[in-house]
Image (cartoon, rainbow, N blue to C red):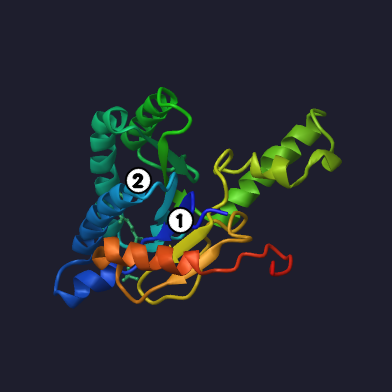
């Protein structure tokens, strides 16, 4: 088994505290966090990691101030403009997880453009998944509802549902489960992130705040992962 994961997922936490420590508004922390995302995405690509999934905005993040929510949406807008210009050249597919219905129409339009560009890239291109208005429970509920609707329409039977069929109904359809989930900033919880997909993920927690997360920190996470004994419910091979 390769010691480099093909899919890592990151909860980009600690932006607010990073800014507050510097006497800056919280949105300055998100701006720095968006820069860290760009750097870490490049570092992942350089290390041969095929999928990087990041938690950008949860179904619960609407509880934040209007000012903070619009700052995060503006950063996403900026990133999408850049992605439209660069993803073909850099060979990076961008995909979104989450319920995009309440997202501003211009952002949805940009996402539509990145989807079209992604479709033009080869299957083996590196893929960034951005979780936007995403919640693991919400994702599971949406999948259950869509399966129930198909049963009701007589298209399939309840017993047709197995783990593979259910995975194919999720936002992450076609993406392998993350082998490694990283959460910076000292918090030891999952916060509704990839609840189905994390069944056998390894976790790496660090006190470093996301804007300070760098290539050395990524390598520490990867070195920790490489030491793990992944048994998937089996027994250790001697
Ligand atoms: C969590 O830190 C971070 C967020 C809720 C927002 C993350 C968004 C970005 C980094 C910008 C947009 C993303 C991309 C991909 C361009 P927190 O605010 O909860 O930190 P705290 O716990 O210190 O308050």
| Gap between marks 1 and 2 measured at Cα | 13 Å
Q: Quadrant of ligand 1?
A: bottom left
Query: Is 159 or 1 nearer to us in this picture?
Result: 1
Q: Quadrant of residue 18?
A: bottom left
| Residue 127 percent coordinates (x, y) | 42, 40
Q: Looking at the rendering, in which quadrant would you find the N terminus?
A: bottom right
Q: Residue 78's x, y, as percent?
A: 23, 42
Residue at x 43%, y 38% (from the top left corner): 95
Q: Earlier in the sequence, mark 1 or mark 2?
A: 1
Cβ at disc 2 under 8 Å from ligand 1: no
**In the current view of this chain or complex, which residue is farthest to the front?**
238
Residue displayed at 85% across by 42% down:
159
Q: Nearer the viewer, residue 230 or 207?
A: 230
- Which residue is identified by label 2? 45
Please, is residue 42 above or below residue 64 in the view?
above
Residue lying at the far left in this picture: please name it: 23
- Where residue 105 sits, quadrant-wise, is top left
Q: CB at mark 1 closer than 8 A to ligand 1? A: no
Residue for point 48% across, 61% down: 181
Relative side of 185 to 195, left or right = left
Q: Residues within 10 Å of mark 2 (few under 14, many from 20)?
A: some
Measured as percent of width and height from the top left, residue 155 is found at: 79, 28
Helix, strand or loop under label 1 = strand
Q: Which residue is mark 1?
A: 9
Query: Mark 1 or mark 2: which is in front?
Result: 2
Residue 141 vertical position relative to residue 32 in the rendered view, above or below: above
Residue drawn at 77 percent across, 45 percent down: 162
Residue 23 located left or right of residue 162: left
Coordinates of residue 75 in the picture (x, y in percent): 25, 48
Q: Nearer the viewer, residue 65 or 54?
A: 54
Task: Tell me: residue 54, above or below residue 14.
Answer: above
Question: In the picture shown, does residue 62 fall above or below 209?
Answer: above
């Amino acid at each position: 088994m390769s010691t480099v994961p093909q899919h890592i997922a990151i909860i980009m936490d600690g932006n607010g505290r990073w800014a507050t420590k510097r006497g800056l508004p919280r949105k300055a922390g998100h701006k720095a966090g968006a820069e860290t995302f760009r750097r870490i995405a490049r570092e992942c690509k350089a290390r041969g990691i095929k999928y990087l999934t990041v938690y950008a905005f949860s179904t619960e993040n609407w509880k934040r101030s209007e000012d903070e929510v619009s700052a995060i949406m503006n950063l996403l807008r900026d990133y999408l403009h850049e992605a439209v210009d660069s993803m073909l050249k850099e060979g990076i597919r961008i995909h979104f997880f989450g319920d995009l219905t309440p997202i501003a129409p211009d952002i949805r339009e940009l996402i539509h453009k990145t989807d079209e560009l992604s479709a033009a890239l080869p299957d083996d291109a590196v893929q960034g998944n951005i979780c936007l208005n995403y919640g693991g429970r919400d994702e599971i509920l949406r999948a259950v509802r869509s399966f129930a609707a198909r049963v009701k329409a007589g298209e399939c039977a309840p017993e047709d549902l197995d783990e593979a069929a259910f995975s194919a109904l999720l936002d992450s359809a076609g993406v392998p489960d993350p082998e490694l989930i990283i959460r910076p900033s000292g918090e030891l919880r999952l916060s509704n992130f990839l609840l189905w997909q994390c069944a056998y993920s390894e976790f790496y927690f660090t006190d470093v705040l996301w804007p300070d997360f760098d290539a050395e920190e990524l390598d520490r996470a990867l070195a920790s992962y490489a030491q793990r004994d992944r048994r998937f419910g089996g027994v250790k091979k001697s």
